[in-house]
Image (cartoon, coloured by chain):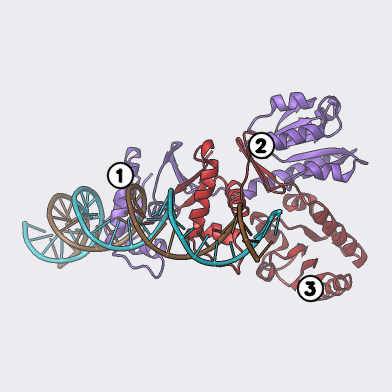
Chain colours: A red, B purple, C cyan, D brown
Amino acid sequence: MEQRILVVDDEKDICDILQFNLENEGYTVDVAHSGEDALAILTDEHQLIVLDVMMGGISGFKMAEQLRETENYIPILFLTAKNTENDKLTGFSSGGDDYVAKPFSVKEVLARVKAILKRAQTKTPIKKWSYKTLSIDIVNNNVTINDKEIQLTKKEFDILSLIVQTSPNALTRNDILDKVWNDNEFVLDRTVDVHIARLRKKLVEYGNIIANRTGFGYYLNC
Amino acid sequence: MEQRILVVDDEKDICDILQFNLENEGYTVDVAHSGEDALAILTDEHQLIVLDVMMGGISGFKMAEQLRETENYIPILFLTAKNTENDKLTGFSSGGDDYVAKPFSVKEVLARVKAILKRAQTKTPIKKWSYKTLSIDIVNNNVTINDKEIQLTKKEFDILSLIVQTSPNALTRNDILDKVWNDNEFVLDRTVDVHIARLRKKLVEYGNIIANRTGFGYYLNC
DNA sequence: CAAGACGGTTACAAAACGGTTACATTTTAC
DNA sequence: GTAAAATGTAACCGTTTTGTAACCGTCTTG
């Protein structure tokens, strides 16, 4: 699988060095010279950001902060000056992150990158979501209520787990369409209703688990 | 908001050290010396479990297993011996979890705890606008006054949140039209009045929350 | 004070929304 | 390939939400 990295540094030389060496190792590398650019370039495909914390415009810290506020978790390898205070870093960094002090050796950065990506890959987490008596095992495509197993189809399962994960927020039909169907699939939004109806039918003996508020959308009602 | 952590370890010394340091950081800490105790003590208010995987009785693994099967999702910070096999851990850990190898530095544990809790919090960005007793939860599409929930329609909700966010400034009907309706929707400006009237009706028991100054517009009156 | 602008309120009409069913089409399993 | 299962579409319905019009009183301004 392609491994895509975004390198963010306002010093062009550093970007070049890192890009050259990382691509040499087989990674796909994109480069940004400011936080603004980085946020624009960043996509779901990036698995790691190498981020200089001292830049003009949006600083690296600010950028990290913004990133952490958005939903998708992505590991960050911080490039810091030696005297950067630790608390600042720990404020933004999470378990998957790491940092290297400037001036760094290329070898060191490569090692960290490799380590982080490896960690991220092997850590294929079992995701089990529960809400009260409802429990959803995303890996096994398994839904149980009060320990009784419910057989759902793929779409039903996808929609239910989306709703559970988004709980207590509501999802409009379009939200659900966007997340459950691929970009190249086009179905009417009313299709969602039908799936919801089928889901409700299967879950009926457990009460009104999926509720709707006109105009707001569907939400978990436990 | 209070952040409550449950520390589970059969070595009392370790519990003491962690409790002291975590409380020093402002967390509320409960301690259990066995899996059984832990499950008994655990409440909805705990936001993180620090869990030693090697304990007598119910082992940490068993406990994690039970947790993942029964309870609502709660992040776990595993304390592991250095030689613990990775697969065992990954079997029980989910995306929100993390682990620290024993012997650990207190500093490291604190950093991990901070990271996990921060991640857990930013994941559900509860944006709440409040003004005195009125509080608007933008994510939930929910409005509460004195903790009592008010059911609003979408338009009512949009208008009210606009007014609250603009407070203490006033909004003319045209301001409201511009911001609440899409560019391609054309409605009479008097429509705004009607929505305001409906809003006021629903909020009547809480006083004159939405006021108007002739010529200037609507504003929040708390 | 008087005219006109402004805003509140109500009743009603129109539109949007969502639930449901039957059936067509696609995918899957054998 | 065929049967069964899953998925998508269309059409019907009732409900909720939203928009309009009309009537009224009140505020502003000359």
Camera-nearest label, 3 or 1:
1
* Residue D23 on image: x %, y %: 12, 55
Kindly identify which residue carries mark 2: B3
**Of the residues shown, which amino acid type is indicated by label 3?**
Glu
Residue type at numbered disc 1: Lys
- Kindly tell me whether residue A171 is visible in this rendering: no
Give the residue type that dot 2 points to: Gln
Q: Secondary structure at mark 1?
A: helix
- In the depicted view, which residue is nearer to us: A137 or B102? A137
Mark 1 lies on residue? B201
Q: CA distance from mark 2 to mark 3?
A: 40 Å
Front residue of this view, candidates B28 and B25: B28
Q: Residues within 10 Å of mark 3 (few under 14, many from 20)?
A: few
Q: Is residue B56 left or right of residue C10?
A: right
Name the residue nearer the viewer: C20 or B216: C20
| Location of the N terminus of chain A (image quadrant) | bottom right
User: Mark 3 highlights which residue?
Assistant: A11
Foreground: disc 2 or disc 3: 2
Q: Secondary structure at mark 3?
A: loop
Quarter-wise, where is residue A4 in the image? bottom right
> Any mark on residue B132, and which?
none
> Residue A161: horizontal and vertical position, in percent?
61, 49
x and y percentages locating residue A217 in the rendered image = 48, 52
Are there few (<14), some (14-19), or many (20+) residues within 10 Å of tag 1?
A: few
Instruction: Indicate whether B215 appears above or below B30.
Output: below
On the picture, is C16 further left or further right than A197?
left
Q: Nearer the viewer, residue A115 or A82?
A: A115
Which residue appears at 68% of the width and 55% of the height? A68
Q: List x then y, in percent, for residue A190.
A: 47, 59
Q: Chain of mark 1?
A: B
Confirm or deny contact between disc 2 and disc 3 (CB under 8 A): no
Q: Is residue B101 left or right of residue B35?
A: right
